[in-house]
Image (spheres, helix red, strand yellow):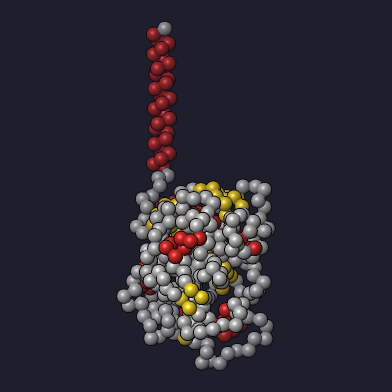
Amino acid sequence: MMIQNFSSLKITLLTAFLIVYGCKKNETSSPIPKTPEGMIWVPKKTFLQGAKETDTYAMPREKPTHEVTVDGFFMDITEVTNAQFKKFVESTNYVTVAERPIIWEEMKKQLPPGTEKPHDSILQPGSLIFNKNVKAVVGMENYYQWWKWKIGANWKHPQGPNSSIEGKDDFPVVHIAMQDALAYCKWANRRLPTEAEWESAALGSNTNTIFTWGNDATLLDKNANTWQGIFPVKNESKDGFEYIAPVKSYPSNSIGLYDMSGNVWEITSDYFNVNYYSELDISTPIINPKGAEKPYNPNNPYQVEYVMKGGSFLCNASYCASFRISAKMGFAEDSASDHMGFRTVADVGMLQK
């Protein structure tokens, strides 16, 4: 009996040892890297992507709501700042799209056939900026009324040649085109988030809310840099910021991410396709979705567009209301503006290389 008990004890101890040792071996073979400086871990989550049932501002392209599962990843706590982008440029001598000469033969491929070439004086490096001098508009369908092409506008000169980013190291870098964001990611060993990853991060510890802070729309001004007043002619700036604000000027969401709503739009890696959600097969689990296979926007059929999220300092409930988590807009891959930036992510595999 004693021998049997001893044998049983031996087997039990040996089994326990193998289990513990095996677990430790597995843990050491694929450890979770230390959180990179300036980033935060976004845990794996199953949540409802797209417009929520009670969201009265929801657009058709945000529907139907569908359940997705997204693996955990690291995300920048803030949007990439001027200081961070400057370090990248100084290290690589990179020239952004807004700073490069415009090649008409390439540009016209994205325009309707027969579009006349503008005068050479107009085809100069520059970017889009919000027209702060608008006093009145005729309808809200024509957004050209409050946007203008500014020669010489770029990340170093956000409002044109006579402006600068001096003293604004902690402001989000703007006038960033898709190619610019991807170049930065390659240098930093990062990537752009998918739309699903972005929504998972914006939700924080929630799984089904309209805003980054919950469902109470009256808390908007306390939580996001958006337009207060009559868009686009009068900004009351009740929050102290008339336009773009330094990062971390508003409270973070529940997991410590700042400015996931308002301030500047954020670039994602997904194609912008207005039919993507409506064509999804939601009868099976959707795990780590990467977005549509191809872009589609009937209002801009000649350009490749990607999804941008979060809204900006120009968002107002009377116009786009894009400070909601599910909101999205498309942007052409070679376009940039003074209200569009980006933040990066990294998965565990990237940091183990």
- Residue pictured at 38% horizontal, 75% vertical: 93
User: At 68% across and 58% down in the image, what residue appears?
Assistant: 279
From the top left corner, tell me how far across and down residue 33 is, in percent.
38, 49
**In the picture shown, does residue 59 fall above or below 155?**
above
Query: Which residue is most to the top?
Result: 1
209 or 205, which is in the foreground?
Answer: 209
268 vs 352, left or right, is right
Query: Where's residue 143, x and y in %?
Result: 57, 79
Picture quadrant of residue 89: bottom left
Say left or right for 318 vs 157. Answer: right
Q: Residue 241 placed where, x, y %?
A: 40, 72
Of residues 336 and 325, the one nearer the viewer is 325
x and y percent of residue 49 in the render? 57, 54
Taking the image as drawn, is residue 279 in sight?
Answer: yes
Q: Residue at x 40, y 24 (%)?
A: 14
Quadrant placement of the C terminus:
bottom left
From this view, report whether residue 180 is shown above or below residue 210.
below
Give the farthest residue toward the left. Answer: 167
172, 116: nearer the viewer: 172
The total of numbered circles placed on residues is 0
Q: Height in image: 287 above or below 61? A: above
Q: Is residue 270 above or below residue 208?
A: below
For the N terminus, the image quarter is top left
**Residue under the image location 65 percent in, 74 percent down:** 299
In this view of the protein, can residue 292 be seen by the observer?
A: no
